Amino acid sequence: MTLQAVSGPPHASLSTARRVIFLVSHSTPGGAQEIWANLAEGLRARGHQVMLAALYPGDAPAQETAPPAAWTYVVPERPASLGAKLAMVRDLARLFDAFQADVVFTALPAANVLAAIAATLAHRPVRVVISHHTPSDTYNRALNLIDGLTGSLASVAHVVGVSEAVQRTHRGKPAAYRAKLITIKNALPPDIEARIARLAEARQGRRTGRQVVAIGRLAEQKNYPVLIRAAAHMPDVVVRIVGDGSEAPALRALAVELGVADRVQFLGFHPRAEALEVLARGDVFVQPSLFEGHSLALIEAAKLGLPLVVSDARVQVEGVSGPDGALCGVVVGVHDDRSLAREILRLLDDPAHYAAAAARATALGAAATYGAMITSYERLMA
């Protein structure tokens, strides 16, 4: 187990610099991994000593990180046996001690549970802040039950959720757990915001085309079959999906079955900068997910000024609601492919409607600020 600490400038915004670990279950690219990599970089810039860690490597490639924040792994591969899993908890406690961690932020169910236990085994006091980036009722049932118990331990100081809808899924957990809940919504780091600003400027004045973009893993959660079925009702619209995953063969087969394989493009995994280029060339952003937390792709699309079309899952509705509660996106039934197609075509066919939807999306994007997000996390370290 090699320690890869990320040191920073000598002055932190807190009165005392902290030694901080951002821990996830695995390093496969995803929203939680992106946020943790961004926060690790941001807190390093504020003078804290930071490590970006995962329990074990995920699917290649690993989530991108900014130098020098390479991934540290607790174990070299995902443990299969009970003995190996217990040994991983021991190694995690040793990691906390070796790094002399003051605070550990965790994301994803396994990391949340194991960090709380490892902190009780460590030889030094460690403040654990667990986080939920998707509704907890979508987790493995047994793991979610254990999370309620370990999250109630004294080693866990706070339980962060990225939306109020996510936090409501903890309503059945112990009172000690619920007393620790705090909501911190996601935002984009300055370098991504700057890139998006340049892309948004280049989009200004561009004539609206007929290209729909979706970004996310090809997994059941993303509910891409409804988008592919909607494509069958939009004969002159191209659908571009950025992402890869286990559902790829089934989704490609569905596109062939429905006769839309020539208009539904599966672009595969792209690094974040390349994915933003694809998004900026689109005309409408669609996210028909069964559930999300507070989607980074949705924030990126909003900041680019793309009209937003999402499913009517509660978390999604909150995601396109502004600070005043006003809807800043179009909401359709989670399995209603005809309504999805109708709303997309209305945006593409009606310039005034398109412009109004784009303006609402831009206002929503402006409300997500990185400075507020990182300061909120930093306050939990005090």
Image (tube, rainbow, N blue to C red):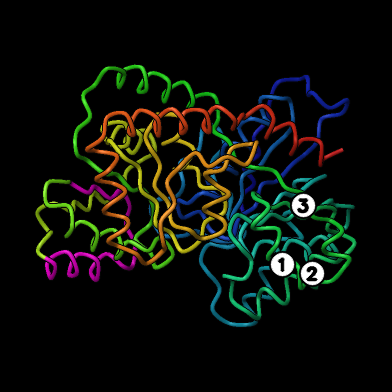
Viewer-proximal residue among 258 and 280: 258
Check the image and report above or below for 174 versus 339.
Answer: below
Residue located beneath label 3 in the image: 129
Determine the CA span between mark 1 and mark 2.
Answer: 6 Å
Type of amino acid at the residue the image marks with label 1: Val
Picture residue at 33% right of the left edge, 52% below the top: 243
| Tag 2 and tag 3, C-beta contact below 8 Å | no
Question: What's drawn in magenta, residue-wise?
Answer: 238-258
Front-most of residues 9 and 150: 150
**Residue at image mark 1:** 113
Query: Where residue 382 sits in the image (x, y, percent)?
Result: 87, 38
Label 2 vs label 3: CA separation?
12 Å
Q: Amino acid at mark 2?
A: Thr
Query: Circle 3: is it few (<14), some (14-19), or many (20+) Cα within 10 Å?
Result: many
Classify 105 as above or below 19.
below
Residue 154's x, y, as percent?
A: 90, 61
Q: Dot 2: what SS?
A: helix
Q: Residue at x 73, y 75 (%)?
A: 146
For residue 150, the mark is 2
In this picture, residue 89 sits left or right of residue 201: right
